[in-house]
Image (spheres, rainbow, N blue to C red):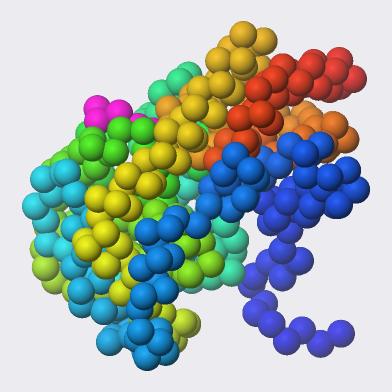
Amino acid sequence: MAKFTKKNVDATELIDPVFYAAANCNRAIEKYGKENVINATIGTLYDEDNNLVALKTVYGTYDSIDAKEKAAYAKSFAGNPDFRRQAYKWVTQGSNVNLCHGVCATPGGTGAISATFSSVLDNGDTIVLPNIAWGSYWTMSQTNNFKTTEYRMFDGDSFNIKSFKETCEKVMEKQGKVLALINDPCHNPTGYSMTNDEWSQVIDVVNELSEKGPFVLVDDIAYIDFSYDLENSRKYMDNFNKIGKNALIVVCFSTSKTLTSYGLRCGAAVAMAREEESVKEFLSLCEKTARSVWSCIPNAAMENFVKVTTEKHDEFMAEKQYYVDLVKHRSDIFKKEADECGLPYYPYKEGFFVTVRLPDNETCEKYQQALFDANIFGVRCDKGIRMAVCSLPIRHTMGLAAKMKKILDETMQKA
């Protein structure tokens, strides 16, 4: 058969681990009913009645936008000026970042990450990723003909700065440029958030290696607005002020997550650097990516974000806080019961996910299937099963850890 697609790309069928688990879960729901199935697959917010949360302040505001505004194109491929200004203010609020900066609107946080990868790297270059991470990072890399290498994310219950540095060093030595990604705070899939000291060490590594070549640090903050300490959730960004002139930081923001508007794709790549020219060069390529791939972001999505986070700010924050507190309550239950029964999990601090820690990926595969057989559905990642507490009602969260520990013990005995 003639091959009509790229030669040097993985053209096998996409089997996304999230949607694979969700498909299995949906089949179980059809057979056994929603109340008899534990659905901890997709990272979207559900209420206690198992309904997808659509914040009233967000959609009431969206409904008030004139139809002509919804129908109109954006004012530029890089995004509407008021959206770009507000996105930067929102992303950096509560910090004292003082760097040259600029913003490109993107289709969700995914678009921001993908556009950054393609704007920074050449064909065949290597991306530095955490070994435990959202699977789509690898999909983005493969479809753009990029290679990947992974640093070990944890040293015990702390960020593994040694592995991060060593991995980046090897890439810098080989290709003379590094693009490294960190997903923080509210890491997907573990729920870990780095300390200020850990961030300070990361920036020290960036500066040391940037003396040998350009260093681009990507910070995926998709879940930041569901941090349990919102007031201080951006304080770590003050460390960015230490970067040297040969470093660029791109913060990838998802209005889709913040506003519970997952299908209304909107986000931003927020670039920061010591020199204005570095930001302009990066944003110029981002804008070309926008024009050639998605053209422009929905005008109303950007307008809605601006209105909600300014005119409806206090009402929006109060409504969202209810669900932040609800997710915390669910995660507290799961963690407490996991500790009581001895179910191992990666260090969790906040956010949508808790991930069960497993010794190897062979055990992980067998354990996931055993959970499926018990109508418990989570997502497999590197040496772990991600449980989305964001979607689990309290009645499904209570007692879950003990059930999972029993199934884990049985899986290990059969190994």
Please say if 371 is above or below 108.
above
For residue 111, side relative to residue 142 (left or right)? left
Which residue is nearer to you in this view: 73 or 133?
73
Residue 28 makes an appearance in the image: yes
Looking at the image, which residue is at 30% across and 28% down? 195
Range covered by the magenta-colored residues? 193-197
Q: Nearer the viewer, residue 221 or 74?
A: 74
Q: Quadrant of residue 385?
A: top right
For the N terminus, give its image quadrant. bottom right
In the rendered image, the vertical position of residue 314 relative to residue 159, given as above or below: below
When asked about the image quadrant of residue 322, the answer is top left
Q: How many circles with numbers are drawn on the protein?
A: 0
The answer to whether any part of residue 203 appears in the image is no
Residue 160 position, x and y percent, is 41, 29
At a point 32% along the width and 53% down the height, the residue shown is 316
Q: From the image, which quarter does the C terminus lie in?
A: top right
Front residue of 292/309: it is 309
- For the stretch drawn in magenta, the main secondary structure is loop
Residue 25 highlighted magenta (yes or no) = no
Q: Nearer the viewer, residue 83 or 177?
A: 83
Residue 54 horizontal/vertical position (percent): 50, 57
**Residue at 27% over, 35% down:** 199
> As displayed, is residue 1 above or below residue 274?
below
Which residue appears at 14% of the width and 71% of the height?
277
Q: Position of residue 399 (x, y in %)?
A: 70, 20
Q: Quadrant of residue 62?
A: bottom left
From the viewer's perspective, is residue 21 above or below residue 394? below
Whole-percent x, y for residue 89 in the image: 18, 58
